[in-house]
Amino acid sequence: MAGYRTPLSRARGLGSAKHGAGHWISERVSSIALVPLTVWAAYGVIKLAAGDYGAAVAWVSDPLNATLLALTLAISFWHMHAGLRVVVEDYIHKALSKSALLILNLFVCGLAAALAIFSILKVAFMGGGAA
Amino acid sequence: MTDAPQNTAKGIRREPPVSPHLMTGGFGSPLLWRWHITMWTSILHRATGVALYVGALIAAAWAVALAEGPERYAQFKELLGSPVGKVVMFGLTLSYFYHLANGVRHLVWDTGHALDVKSANASAALVLAFALAATVSVWGIAAMAGAI
């Protein structure tokens, strides 16, 4: 995310722990991407809730839907990780608890994102599971 | 902070301004500052963000259930379609539209616009009204689409 900073800002190397600006910018950039993506996903939720398993598999198998779904999930978990990280850093001050929660946050977001995206790709490439 | 000077010309010493910390700490302790709509919108942004964290985990569970097959998918839909599931989904819809609108409000602030008190109060009310209206509308559309 350093690419979004001005050359002067990078040269000075200032800010919280010298990389706070990168975190701040990544939260904003991911939120801008999530505005259209999640509105589209909300439409998808209504569509899928009204349909059955076959309809859901057909919807996810469409290349555009599969790509947008994978992007929505990846950017959502990225954004969530950044957001909850700040919450933990603000409220938890014991070094060990703080580190443990930050690591847990990273692992939960990483695992959930990997599981979700792998599942979407499996359905998109191989169709639904056995009936 | 209207009462900034500690020493006036007449030599009267005033108490220095204090930050809006909790007076005694812990739950139920009174705030030094009176509750204001912008305090609510700030706290709600965090609270809805944490709620949406759970929502994203539900979305991940949906994707896994879909990949596992029709039986798991039926179980998943049954769970979300149960009364408790519907309450959770309604809460997540409200959280989503709130976090969306207030997130856009933050993005506008980041450009340096609408930062004055009057604008912040107005946008706070607008965000709350939008979240309620959008949630009710979307559930109405979902009901008409046969999704509930």
Image: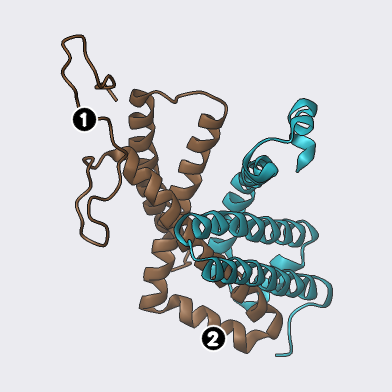
Chain colours: A cyan, B brown
Quadrant containing the C terminus of chain B is bottom left
Label 1 sits on what residue type?
Glu
Depth order, front residue of A20/B58: A20
Depth order, front residue of A65/B31: B31
- Residue at 38% x, 30% y is B120
In terms of image quadrants, where is residue A64? bottom right
Indicate the chain on which mark 1 is placed: B
Please give left or right for residue B87 compared with residue B50 in the image. Answer: left
Q: Local crowd at mark 1 within 10 Å, few (<14), some, or many (≥20)?
A: few
Image disc number at residue A17 = none
Indicate the chain on which mark 2 is placed: B
Residue A37 vs A114, above or below: the answer is above
- Residue at 54% x, 54% y is A86
Q: Position of residue B126 (x, y in %)?
A: 37, 36
Depth order, front residue of A22/B40: A22
In terms of image quadrants, where is residue B27? bottom left
